[in-house]
Amino acid sequence: FFFGGIMSWRNTWDKYIDYIMAHTLDASGERHCDRACIIGMDGSKWTTDGHDNHLQITYQEAAFIARVMRSKDFTQFRASGIQAAGVRYQFLREEDGKLVLGKKKGNGALTLQASKTAIVIGHTKEGGQQGNTNKGVAVIVEYLESLGMRVVSRSRCACW
């Protein structure tokens, strides 16, 4: 996959929303992810609300998701669901302490996958194939892992 060369850390993380969505295309060209965002494992928002396809997650939702993903104790998701962009999704399952899937009838589905420093979240439109969104999210997580990303501050990152 191509990410347009090495990213300048001054650039916004918003272009990763486009990359996530591009990797969810099926053979017919249909895109299954309609919104996405990236948050830090500390609950900070890496992508901005200004992108047309940004999943409009609140700071409180981001902090809660990050806390659960860091702890790898998904009891709170099981008990109360996954809240994102004002919608509560039913927790479906987690895999390997890194991947979490959720669904809300009439609202689509969520895919959350953690890297060492970030959580990539993709939203599957109602009627879309969540497996395609899972793939798009995984591609970005793998790319971030390959860079050895670590957070220096909310606005700057560095590689090891």
Image (tube, rainbow, N blue to C red):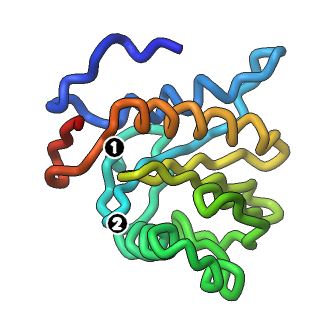
- Kindly identify which numbered label has been placed on residue 102: none
Q: Which quadrant of the view contains residue 13?
A: top left
Q: Please give the name of the residue rendered at 71% of the width and 23% of the height, measured from the top-left corner.
A: 25
Q: Which quadrant of the view contains residue 125?
A: top right
| In-front residue for pair 67/125 | 67
Report the side of 40 relative to 97 (left or right).
Answer: left
- Kindly identify which numbered label has been placed on residue 50: 1
Q: Please give the name of the residue rendered at 38% of the width and 75% of the height, measured from the top-left corner.
A: 60
Quadrant location of the C terminus in the rendered image: top left
Please state the horizontal and vertical placement of residue 20, each as a whole percent of the image.
Answer: 54, 32
Mark 1 to mark 2 CA distance (whole Å): 18 Å
Q: Is residue 147 above or below residue 71?
A: above
Q: Is residue 86 above or below residue 160?
A: below
User: Does the residue at mark 1 contact the one at mark 2 (Cβ under 8 Å)?
Assistant: no
Q: Which residue is mark 2?
A: 43
Q: Tell me the kind of residue under disc 1.
A: Gly
Q: Please give the name of the residue rendered at 45% of the width and 61% of the height, measured from the top-left corner.
A: 57
Q: Please give the name of the residue rendered at 63% of the width and 49% of the height, measured from the top-left corner.
A: 123
Q: Residues within 10 Å of mark 1 (few under 14, many from 20)?
A: few
Please state the horizontal and vertical placement of residue 33, each as a whole percent of the image.
Answer: 65, 38
Report the side of 4 relative to 126 (left or right).
Answer: left
Figure disc tally: 2
Q: Residues within 10 Å of mark 2 (few under 14, many from 20)?
A: many
Q: Tell me the kind of residue under disc 2.
A: Gly
Please state the horizontal and vertical placement of residue 34, each as a whole percent of the image.
Answer: 62, 39
